[in-house]
Image (cartoon, coloured by chain):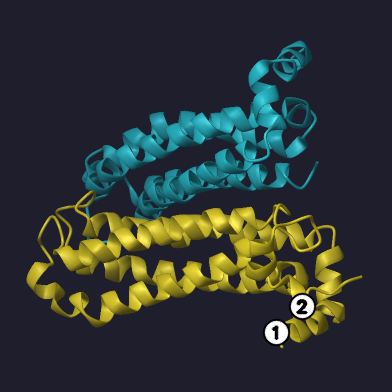
Amino acid sequence: MISTFTEWLASTSGSIALHESLYMYPLVESVHVLTLCVFVGMAAILDLRLLGLTLKRVPVSEVAGRLLPWMVAGFTVMLISGVLLFYAIPIRSWHNVFFRFKLILLVLAGLNAWVFHANIWMTVKSWDLEPRAPRAARVAGMASLLLWAMIIVSGRMIAYNWFDCDQPHSHAIDVLGGCDAYPKH
Amino acid sequence: MLLPYIQAIEASRLHDVISTSTWAFAVIESIHLLALAAIGGAVLVVDLRMLGFGLRSQPIPDLARNAYPWFVGSLIVMLATGIPLFISEPTKCYYSYPFAVKMISLVLAMIFAFTIRRKISTAEETRISPVVYKLVALVSLALWFGVGAGGRWIGFSG
């Protein structure tokens, strides 16, 4: 079903135009990469604050509150540029194992942020000034750092065709990349 | 002028190891990217503060001192991974316009970061005018943007 969608998407004129453009695609790619500094950079500062590794004397709620608008802005730009990159190369991306792995990691990072906000964050007033946040918050901070690091690495790896369906590949890749549905032409 | 050195690097053992390996470039490049996020955060948090955004209730010198070890640490990782990336394709870099932009921006950005920006950002806040803070932040952001954008564009020009 998704393959039908990606094949349709790849045949749209906008997708072809972006894919074949001389400057637009590299521009979108550059925006996507450089916005890392805004989104992951700011998120990392909050995570490190939770772990007690930086800004120890600044209340956690202040770090989170002041940096959140930048994280939201950065994430929005990353999301839009990321969707555009997928739009330009839908079929290959969908069947790329690193792309699939990245999607799973993104869901996990979202879940981690949600669990953090719905639970330990509720009591932030009682540990706001602690140089090191309580264990649950530190676990969330560490998980966030690790997940985003893996997201960056898997995102970078999408560029390589080592495990692409149209390359010689193992049975495991066949399954993980859903190569059965990969168009044969 | 630099071409003989480029050719020497091209003929070196390290060049062969990285450029013939399937994984080496990708792994080094990934670490380079991780450090980009870290250095981006460390630079941005201080530059935004000097522009009047972000952690506005915090004194600038405190923030600058807090960010400094993360800045230096990630810069070291950037250089330690950037150099082998260069060694793996020196001739391409030598003829690459974006690479030249990146190197010039990098040298200027580092000089600026360790001299003027460091001095201004750690000085007592009452002694620095808001205009000076803003100017320093804008120059810093522009120079590091040149490094990042130039770096990304090296990959498109080959």
Q: Which residue is mark 1?
A: A2
- Residue at (86%, 72%) from the top-left corner? A16
Q: What kind of residue is marked 2?
A: Ala
Q: Which residue is mark 2?
A: A181
Looking at the image, residue A44 lies above or below residue B19: below
The image shows residue B32 at horizontal and vertical percentages of 53, 41
- Residue at (47%, 59%) from the top-left corner? A38
As drawn, which residue projects farthest toward the left? A126
Query: Is A4 left, or right, of A170 in this rendering?
Result: right
Quadrant of residue A171 within the rendered picture: bottom right
Chain-order first, disc 1 or disc 2: 1
Query: Is B100 left, or right, of B138 in this rendering?
Result: right
The image shows residue A17 at horizontal and vertical percentages of 86, 71
Q: Secondary structure at mark 1?
A: helix
Q: What kind of residue is marked 1?
A: Ile
- Residue at (31%, 38%) from the top-left corner? B69
The image shows residue A85 at horizontal and vertical percentages of 70, 68
Q: Chain of mark 2?
A: A
Quadrant of residue B155 within the rendered picture: top right
The image shows residue B43 at horizontal and vertical percentages of 41, 47
Nearer to us in this view, A59 or B36: B36
Q: Secondary structure at mark 2?
A: helix
Q: Colour of chain A?
A: yellow
Nearer to us in this view, B129 or A100: A100
Q: CA distance from mark 1 to mark 2?
A: 9 Å
From the rendered image, report the letter of the chain displayed in cyan. Answer: B
